[in-house]
Each structure stands twice: as C-alpha cells, then as structure tokens.
Amino acid sequence: MTDQTVLQVEVARGVARLTLDSPANRNALSRAMRAQLRRALTDVLADDAVRVVVLDHTGRVFCSGMDLTEAAGGSAADQGVNEFPELLELVWSAPKPVLAAVRGPARAGGVGLLAACDVVVAGSSATFAFSEVRIGVVPAVISAVVRPRMLPNVVHRLMLTGEVFDAATAAGGGLVDLAVADDEVDATVAAQVTALAAGAPAALAETKRLLRSGTRLGDQFPALLQLSARFFAGEEGQEGIAAFREKRPARWVPAAE
C-alpha cells in the first residue's frame, strides 16, 4: 500500500512551491510527509531551472510538528524524529534560497522547519510554540536551527514555558522575517521571490554558504538527536503524548485548586 500524497509540488517560472497538504492531521511531520518532503527537496534542489523554493501549506495549520500518533509506543530507535535532521539539513544547506509562507499555527518541529528557511513570511493568523516540554520531550533537534535565528533571552523563555506566541513576537525575537496582515502574505511572498530570483545562482549559493558557515548542523545533530529520541520514547514523553491524544492534563501538571 503506497502512502497517501500529503505534499503538493509545483514548479513554474523558476519557483518550486512545496505545499504541505495533510490538513486532517494538521500537516504533521508524519512518515509520509517526511519522505515526500525529503524527496521533493532533493529533486528541486538538483533542478537547474529552479531558482527559489517556497514552503507553503493548505488548511489552517502550517505544521503541528511530529505526528504523535506514530510516536506513541515506539522505542528511541523507532522515533520519526530520527529522520528530521536530514530534512533540516536539506533546507538549511540548500544552495538555493528557501522561503516559508506561514498562514497559521506552527508548533514544535513545524517551527524548526520554518526556522531552517532563509526567509520567513508570517500572516497575522500565524502562531508559534515550542510545545515540546508540555508533552514531556525536548526541543533538541530544532534548537540547532532555531538558536542561530532567535535572540537568546527570547528563545530561552519560550522554549522553557512552551507558551504560544504571535507573529509580532516571533518577528521581534528573530524567528520571523516579515510579519504582515493575512491578506498581504501572497504579495509579500511574491515580492521576496522576485528579489531572491534577481540574484545570480552561483553568487546566491556562495553567499548562503558564507552566511551558514558559522553553524555546522552535522556536528550538532548526533548528540541532539540522541537526546530528542530518548525523551520521545521515555516515560515522560509517552505520558505527554498519551495525555495530548486523550485531551487531558499530563500527570505532572499541578491540579487546579
């Protein structure tokens, strides 16, 4: 049985638009989504006709992070997060500019995915949260791409609290580049695509390599991945995942008086 198509791929006039299209599970990074996104990124980055890549989404949610249904009950070796570093590396180190169009909520791994992009445009309906600690896991893998983007004091507070924050806060903290009204997202994305495509391909690739040279993701991922997978499979992580799916407080949440 083949995986359902959860990613739309459209290439036109030098722009590859990869649209997350699994609204039923809030565009979660399921096994199918990871595989299709990895394959599409590999293909478009190798296509000389593609000058700019845009990550977009259907439905109300940009990306809710790892598919917690698949994470339930698995060992550390079986967790989907093990495949996530390769995806982040593909975006982070892509020789072509990658732009994210965020029109709704992004959570956990979804925040990591957009943080790996070169330019992030967010509408006023976009919200963000490092929700990992609230389900008993650690935002370890995504920290490799989030921390270089965000102000240290801002990311420190938001990763510890797991609070939801809006596009204006995300822009002030460095996660989002351009926060605009919802009805201005398309025009803003189009303007940024035009600006990016005006650069010479080799010059853009070398400039991006230069800008990324201070952060070597490959050196960080082994330890971060071990930490992340251990917590996904651990007692707290499995309790948090169960609580999330059962729509109840996790056992560590203080009872209301």
Image (cartoon, helix red, strand yellow):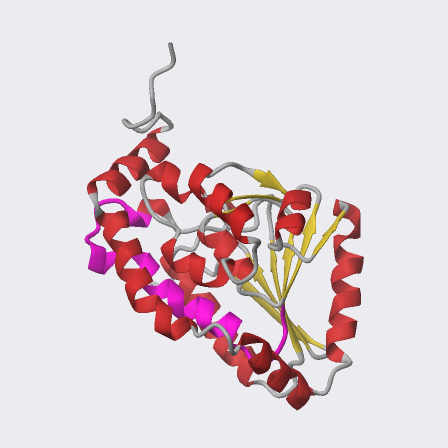
Above or below, 92 against 124 in this view is below
Q: Magenta span: helix, strand or loop, mainly? A: helix
Instruction: Say above or below: 246 vs 96.
Output: above
Residue 177 at x, y percent in the picture: 68, 58
Examine the image and state in which quarter residue 246 appears: top left
Picture residue at 50% right of the left edge, 58% below the top: 146
Q: 255 left or right of 114?
A: left
* Quadrant containing the N terminus in the rendered view: bottom left
Q: Where is residue 200 in the image (x, y as percent from the top left)?
A: 72, 87
Residue lying at the far top of the rendered structure = 257
User: Furthest-front residue in view?
Assistant: 153
Q: Which picture quadrant has residue 238? A: top left
Does the magenta portion include 32? no
Report whether 63 appears left or right of 223: right
Q: What stretch is highlighted in magenta?
A: 70-98
Residue toward you, 229 or 102 = 229
Q: Is residue 15 left or right of residue 152?
A: right
Q: From the top left corner, tell me how far across and down residue 117 is, in percent.
A: 58, 65
Question: What quarter of the picture does the C terminus occupy?
Answer: top left
Nearer to me, 67 or 159: 159
Residue at figure coordinates x 44%, y 68% from the top left: 87
Of the pair 115 and 187, the residue shown nearer to us: 115
Find residue 161 and report its horizontal and vertical position in percent: 45, 37
- The number of numbered discs placed on residues in the rendered structure image is 0
Image quarter of residue 194:
bottom right
